[in-house]
Image (cartoon, rainbow, N blue to C red):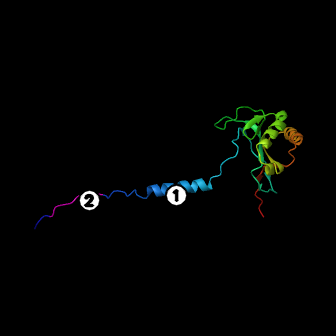
Amino acid sequence: MGRFPRRKHQVPGLNLAALPDLIFTVLFFFMIVTHMRDVSPKVRYEVPRGTELRETANKSGVIYILIGKPVDAQGNVTSQDTRIQLNDRMVTVDEIPQQIANERSKMTESDRQNLVVTIRADRETDMGIINDVKQALRRAGALNINYSADMVNRGK
C-alpha cells in the first residue's frame, strides 16, 4: 500500500475588509443618538422628584442655573458650601442680574422674548437660597422660571 503525504491544515486568515465599514456605522450611530450637554456641571446636585412634569420645548433661549455643592473635575465634592453656577460660570446671588443681562445680549430677539431660566437645585439646598436666586431673577426681568426634577414612577 502506498503512503499519501500528509498535508498540514492551516486556518484561513480572517477577512478584515468589512471592519472599517462596521466601525464607521457604529460611530455614526453614537453620533446620532448621543445628547451633548449644554452646560458642564461644576456643582453636584440631585434634583427632587416630581409627578407633574413637562419637557421644555424651546431650548435655544434657555439659561441654566445649577445650585449645589462644588465639585472638581473628577466629580468629587470639594466643599460643603452651596454654590450657584449660571451656565458655565460660578456666580453669587448679587451677580445674577448682570450675568442674565450678559446672556440676553448674546441672544436673538425672539430668544430674548422667550427667555426661560431653568433651575436645577440639589434636593438638600435650603429654600432661602432658591428664594434669593428667584428674587435676583425678578430684578433681572427673567420671570419665566422652570424647575428641573426627576419623574416619580407611579404604580397604577
Which residues lie in the magenta part?
Answer: 4-10
Of residues 65 and 45, which is closer to you in this image? 65
Of residues 91 and 51, which is closer to you in this image? 91
Quadrant in the rendering for residue 43: top right
What is the number of the mark on residue 142? none
In this figure, which residue is indicated by the disc labeled 1?
Answer: 25
- Give me the residue at 62% from left, 53% from top: 34
In the image, farthest residue toward the left? 1
Q: Where residue 25 appears, x then y in whole percent?
A: 52, 57
The answer to if 104 sits in the magenta stretch is no
Left/right placement of residue 103 relative to residue 13 reads right
If you read the primary sequence from the N terminus, does the residue marked by circle 2 or circle 1 appear first?
Answer: 2
Q: Is the residue under label 1 in contact with that under label 2 (CB below 8 Å)?
A: no
Question: In the rendered view of the protein, which quadrant contains the C terminus?
Answer: bottom right
- Give me the residue at 49% from left, 54% from top: 23
Q: Disc 2 to disc 1, how far (Cα)?
A: 35 Å
